């Protein structure tokens, strides 16, 4: 089942020189900037008639930060599980780079390329010491011990849990545990990180730290991020937002674009960021506000302008 | 009560006991258990106890923890002690006699030896789990059992199951407490009533616990798959096991102590 060296060996060689976009020669004329692609994907869980995914087509570009939103049961998690071949589509195809997820021989390679972090940190930590858990994936891939050491140290530093490396996971807070889980995935040096409601069970501080980590991974290390979330403020940080409803994509675009369509978003039983909602309400009440506001700072600036008629003084970023 | 269960909890440290090769530690622990039974005479047990106390001292494990690992088995010790005390008969005159109960000097001796033996047994095996991280421990077991995989015994799978079981002990304990509190908040009476009522009151605790454990197992399996787990084939380890000179030296020291324990039988006949 394992193909020695071919998984970690070749990927390692390729990645040590550059973390950024590196074109592969294997493409059959396809866009090599493409990380993930779902083509007319339909999926239903065997015991039910209901289609969890219904003819969904989308793609994720390399280096992109995509947020996926949607009410419960809209198929977000099902889509996520298609992106690293945990689930295979009933019809249609999912591609990771140019590999169709049905290619069983390249399963490990796909799992290594697309790392996944789940909601409950307790249920994805295998080992009883942080560093041993981070090393789990590399042990599975058959990476030599000396290299495991350097890669997990690097991953733990990237996730900001290096100082906890010898602790027992159950002694850590939820946010720290989730960052351990992220480090465990990052250690594989994936091209893409999928967070399946990874912030849902965390307290606000833990959530913020996890989001900061994810943001850093995306910005500084060029890791593509697909973040499934219920928090609109987190979605507002993304490059692109996909709103799902009943197994297909209902809305798609830059956060500003999507969240300015307040009524449409609300019709899908979702919220918009509070700033967007405030501006929308003010406009409706007769105080015209720009309709593309999603952040707190820009909302404050716009309010200042609306009230005083002057440009808001630029305040230093925290 | 639930918090007292410490089996499988690792207390990291850097003492020679901690850093010793786990394979050697396992073999020594097994040898220690055997010696506890072979040398179960006053001298043998005294050596065993002092030896164990010494090891605990070296590994700097707080006394509180040892007490905590022994606490849950106190009822068993008390139960066997009472049975031994009253049911064993000696050769001489009983020290004490009342109705059908007779206490002989021999039975007192035996009771004490038995109690010390059980305590040493638990404390000794706990030392292994306190000083060895479970992953290292299962790794060692896997390696020790490796020859058996030639006989198509699923050694890696067994080791993996053990690791996961150990990993989830604290999680499930926490969960049990949560469920118990939730049921108490709904009016369940877990600490009062007749034995039958108490056992019945546990059902609403166990069912959610089991369901949640199955759900956890399902999610864990998926998370493991996502991290490229595909069985033991071609796996490497972060921490390689290599027998060092110090392991041999410490192993030999322990072996000498064990021989002493065994020799104690020459002076005191084993009971």
Image: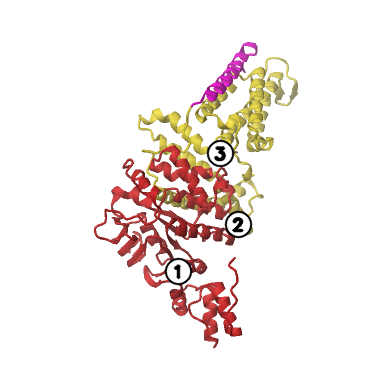
Chain colours: A red, B yellow
Displayed quadrant of residue A97: bottom left
Checking the image for residue A71, the label placed there is 1
- Label 3 or label 2, whichever comes before in sequence order: 3
Using the image, tell me which numbered label, if any, was put on residue A179: none
Residue drawn at x 58%, y 20% is: B253
Residue A43 location (% of width, % of height): 33, 62
Task: Identify residue for label 3.
Answer: B8
Q: Report the residue at 42% width, 68% height from top.
A: A240
The answer to whether residue B224 is magenta is: no
- Image quadrant holding the C terminus of chain A, namely bottom right
Magenta residues, as a range? B243-271
Where is residue B57, by image quadrant?
A: top right
Instruction: Give coordinates of residue A289: x percent, y percent.
Output: 52, 83
Q: CA distance from mark 3 to mark 2?
A: 26 Å
- Residue B207 visible? The answer is no
Asked if the residue under mark 2 is in contact with the one under mark 3, i.e. CB atoms within 8 Å, the reply is: no
Residue under label 2: B182
Q: How many marks?
A: 3
> What residue occupies the far bottom of the structure in this picture?
A286
Q: Specify the principal SS of the magenta part.
A: helix
Let me know if residue B51 appears in the view. yes
Q: Residues within 10 Å of mark 2 (few under 14, many from 20)?
A: few
Residue drawn at x 47%, y 35% as measured from the top left? B139
Q: Secondary structure at mark 3?
A: loop
Q: Is residue A53 above or below residue B152?
A: below
Query: Is B246 contained in the magenta span?
Result: yes
Which percent across, then down, holds residue A278?
55, 78
Q: Secondary structure at mark 1?
A: loop
Chain letter of the residue carrying label 3: B
Label 1 vs label 3: CA separation?
Answer: 41 Å
């Amino acid at each position: 089942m394992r193909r020695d060296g071919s998984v970690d060996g070749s990927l390692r060689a390729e990645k040590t020189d550059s973390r950024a976009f590196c074109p592969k020669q294997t493409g059959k004329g396809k866009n090599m900037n493409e990380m993930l692609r779902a083509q007319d994907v339909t999926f239903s869980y065997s015991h039910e008639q209901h289609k969890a995914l219904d003819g969904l087509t989308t793609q994720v570009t390399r280096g992109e930060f995509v947020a996926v939103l949607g009410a419960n049961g809209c198929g977000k998690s099902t889509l996520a599980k298609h992106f690293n071949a945990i689930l295979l589509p009933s019809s249609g195809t999912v591609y990771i780079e140019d590999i169709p997820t049905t290619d069983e021989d390249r399963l490990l390679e796909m799992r290594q390329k697309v790392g996944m972090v789940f909601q409950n940190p307790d249920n994805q930590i295998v080992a009883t010491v942080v560093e041993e858990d981070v090393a789990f994936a590399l042990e599975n891939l058959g990476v030599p011990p000396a290299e495991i050491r350097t890669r997990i140290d690097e991953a733990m530093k990237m996730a900001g849990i290096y100082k906890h490396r010898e602790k027992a996971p159950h002694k850590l807070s939820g946010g720290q545990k989730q960052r351990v889980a992220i480090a465990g995935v990052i250690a594989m040096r994936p091209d893409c990180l999928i967070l399946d409601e990874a912030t849902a069970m965390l307290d606000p501080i833990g959530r913020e730290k996890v989001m900061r980590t994810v943001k850093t991974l995306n910005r500084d290390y060029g890791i593509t991020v697909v973040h499934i979330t219920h928090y609109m403020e987190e979605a507002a940080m993304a490059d692109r937002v996909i709103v799902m409803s009943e197994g297909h994509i209902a809305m798609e675009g830059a956060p500003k674009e999507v969240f300015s369509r307040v009524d449409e978003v609300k019709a899908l039983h979702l919220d918009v960021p509070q700033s967007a909602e405030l501006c929308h309400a003010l406009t409706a009440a007769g105080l015209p506000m720009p309709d593309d506001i999603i952040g707190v700072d820009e909302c404050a600036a716009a309010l200042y302008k609306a009230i005083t008629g002057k440009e808001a003084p630029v305040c230093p970023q925290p | 009560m639930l918090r007292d269960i410490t089996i499988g909890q690792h207390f990291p440290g850097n003492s020679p006991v901690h850093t010793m090769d786990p394979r050697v530690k396992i073999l020594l622990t097994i040898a220690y258990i055997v010696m506890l039974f072979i040398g179960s005479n006053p001298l043998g047990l005294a050596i065993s106890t002092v030896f164990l106390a010494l090891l605990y001292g070296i590994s700097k494990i707080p006394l509180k923890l040892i007490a905590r690992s022994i606490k849950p088995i106190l009822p068993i010790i008390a139960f066997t002690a009472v049975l031994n005390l009253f049911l064993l008969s000696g050769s001489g005159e009983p020290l004490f006699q009342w109705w059908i109960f007779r206490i002989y000097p021999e039975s007192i001796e035996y009771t004490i030896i038995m109690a010390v033996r059980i305590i040493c047994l638990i404390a000794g095996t706990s030392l292994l789990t306190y000083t060895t991280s479970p992953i290292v421990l299962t790794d060692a077991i896997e390696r020790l059992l490796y020859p058996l995989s030639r006989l198509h015994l699923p050694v890696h799978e067994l080791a993996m199951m053990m690791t996961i079981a150990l990993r989830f002990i604290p999680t499930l304990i926490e969960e049990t407490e949560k469920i118990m509190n939730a049921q108490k908040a709904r009016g369940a009476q877990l600490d009062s009533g007749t034995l039958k009522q108490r056992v019945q009151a546990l059902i609403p605790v166990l069912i959610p616990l089991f369901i949640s454990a199955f759900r956890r197992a399902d999610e864990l399996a998926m998370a493991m798959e996502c991290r490229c787990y595909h069985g033991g084939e071609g796996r490497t380890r972060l921490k390689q096991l290599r027998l060092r000179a110090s392991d041999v030296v410490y192993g030999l020291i322990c072996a000498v102590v064990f021989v002493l324990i065994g020799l104690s039988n020459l002076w005191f006949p084993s009971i």
